[in-house]
Amino acid sequence: VTESAPLAAIHRIVEQPEEPGEVARRFNEMVKTACERFNEGALPQSVTMLDLAERIVKEKRVDPQIVEAVRQKGDESLDVERLRRYAEVPRLHPLLRRVLNFFLATRPPGLLAELLRETKRERRKLILQLLEVHGAPSRQQALARLHSPFGKGEGDEKWYFRRNLLYLLRRIPMGGQDGLPPEDDVDVASRHAVLQFPAALLKEAIANLGQLRHEKAEKKLIALLDELEKMLLKPGPNPPYDPREGRLLLDRVVSALARFGTPEARRAVVEHALKKKPELGDTMARLSELSGQDLSADGESLDRLLTALKANTPRRVFGIVLAQNETNVKHIIDALSTTPSEMVREVFDSLARKFAGLEIGKAATRALAALDSAGQVPEAPYDGRSGEIEIFGLPALVQGLAESGASGLLRLKDPRGEIDAEIVLRAGRMKGCEARGLTGEDAFYQLLERPSPASYVFERQPADAKPEPSADNLPEFAVLCQEGMRRHDEFAQATVVVPDDARFSKTQVRPEHHADELDGMFVNGLWNLIVGGATAKDCEGALKADSFRIRRQLVHWVESGALAVQ
C-alpha cells in the first residue's frame, strides 16, 4: 500500500528509534493526535492515522502490552458529541467503524458490556447508535445475548438491557434468505413476548414480532392476543399488569397483527373487535388498524364486518332514526374504506343516502369518494416512465430506479392529480426530496410514514443536471427505505396510544423529551401547541417535522404521565 508523504514521514518517525520505550512513546503520541483530529472534526485524517497505527501493530514494532494499554484507554479522549454527530450520519459509518474498531471499549463486546451496566438514558442511546454503526457484528452478538436464559423480573440481566438489544435488532438489517426473516430473530422475539416480563420489555418484543413477516411471529402475536384477553377478562389475584397497561398492550398487539396483512391475522383482529367487552377497552376502535388494506379477497373477514355493520346501523321506524352505536359504525366504515368491492360500495351508498344528515352518512360518503378517486389514473403530462404505485409501493419504485443508476425527477401525484412529492435522483442516489412541506430525509420518511396510493411520473435528466449541494449528506435509498418502514411501523403503534384527533391536558408530571429526540426547540414548540389545545394531527401541519417524530414525543409524554388524553 502506497503512503502519502506525510504518512510515510510519521511512519518513519515512529519506527526510527531503536529504544522500545521511545517507539512506544511516539506510537502513543500518534494515537493521541488521531483522537485530537477526530475531536476537531477531521474524521478522514483521524482514520488515516489510526489505520497507520494498525499497520505498525501488525509489523510488531510496538510492545504488545503498550498496544493493549492504548487500545483499552485511548477511546476515553474521544469527544462524546463528535461520536454522536458522526453516528447520526449513515454515510460516515464506514469511517467511524474504523475508529471504533481500533479501541477495545468501542468494539461490539465492549459497547455491550457498557450497555449492560449503564443506567443513564442519554449514554445508552449513544451506545446503541455506536452498536448500530458496527452493523452485522453487533447484531450477531445481540442475538447471542438474547438467547441466554432470562427469568421473571430482572432475571440474569437487567430487563432494559434486553429491551435495548431487541431495539437494536430492529435497527440493523437482518440477513434472511428467500425474503424471510431469520428464524433466530423470530425465536428471540417470541421468547421475550411473555406476560410475566416487564411491560416495556414486552412492548419491544411485540414491536419486533410486528416487523417480522413470518408465520411463527404471526402465531405468537395471535396467542399473545388471546392471553391478554383472558388476563383482562379474568385477572386473578396477582395479574402481571394493571388494566390500563393491559389495554395498552392489546393496542400494540392488534396494531402489529393488522400490519401483517394476512387473512389469519386480519381474522384475529376482527374476532377481537367484535367481542366488544368493556374490560378489553374499545375493541371496535382497533378495527381502524385495517384501514389501508383491501379485504376483497378475504371473504370471511369481509362478511363478518359487513354483518357487524348491518347490526350496528341505526334503524328508521316511521321516519324516526332509532339510535345505535354510531361510533362502532364509523370504525367499521374506516376498516372497509380501502376495500373496493361492489358489496362494500353498495352498503356505503345505502348509508350515505339513508343517513345523509348523520355522521355515519357523511363518513360513508367520504369513504365512497376515496374509493372512487383511488380508481382514477391521472394522465401523465409527458412521455416517460409513469404508472400507479400501491400504498406501499414507493420503496420498490425508488430502489428499482437506484439499481438502474437513473438520473431525473420523480414526481408523485395524489388521486386528484396534484403533486404530492418531488424526488431528485442522480446516478441512482437521492439528491433532494420535497414532500408535504418537508425537505430532505424528513420528506422521504413522511411519504413512508403516512403512505397513500399515488401515480408517478419519472422524467429522465442528464446526470449533471441541477446539482444539489446537500446530495452527499443523503443516505442510499436502501437505508432510507429501511428507516422509513421502521418509522412507519412505530408510527402505526403510536397512533393507537395517541390518535389523530386526540386532545390533552397537562399534569403535574414534568415533561421530558424522548431519549431519541435532541432538538429542544422542536420539543418546546410541540409542547406549547399541545397544551394550547391542538390535536396530534394539527401539530403535523404546524411543525417542520415528520409525523413519526411528533407522535413519538406525544406518546412519551402520555406514557410518562406528563399528558393525559381527554
Image (cartoon, rainbow, N blue to C red):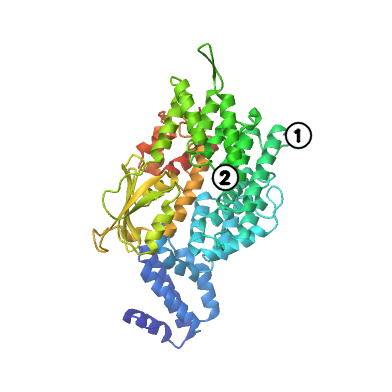
User: Where 383 sits versus 17, above or below?
Assistant: above
Inspect the image, locate mark 2, and give the three-letter code of the amino acid beneath it: Ala
Q: Nearer the viewer, residue 505 or 105?
A: 505
At a point 35% along the width and 50% down the height, the residue shown is 456
Is 209 displayed left or right of 89 in the figure?
A: right
Is 447 displayed left or right of 161 in the figure?
A: left
At a point 67% along the width and 36% down the height, the residue shown is 229
Label 2 packing within 10 angstroms: few (<14), some (14-19), many (20+): many
Instruction: Find residue 278 and report its horizontal and vertical position in percent.
Output: 64, 28
Is 115 displayed left or right of 52 in the figure?
A: right
Asked whether the viewer can see residue 161, the reply is yes
User: Where 189 sits versus 224, above or below?
Assistant: below
* Residue for badge 2: 256
Residue 237: give its label: 1
Question: Along the polypeptide, which appears first: circle 1 or circle 2?
Answer: 1
Q: Nearer the viewer, residue 566 or 215?
A: 215
Q: Nearer the viewer, residue 119 or 306?
A: 306
- SS for callout 1: loop
Residue 403: give its label: none
Quadrant in which residue 252 is drawn: top right
Instruction: Find residue 360 and report its horizontal and vertical position in percent.
Output: 48, 25
Q: CA distance from mark 1 to mark 2?
A: 29 Å
Quadrant in which residue 404 is drawn: bottom left
Quadrant in which residue 309 is drawn: top right
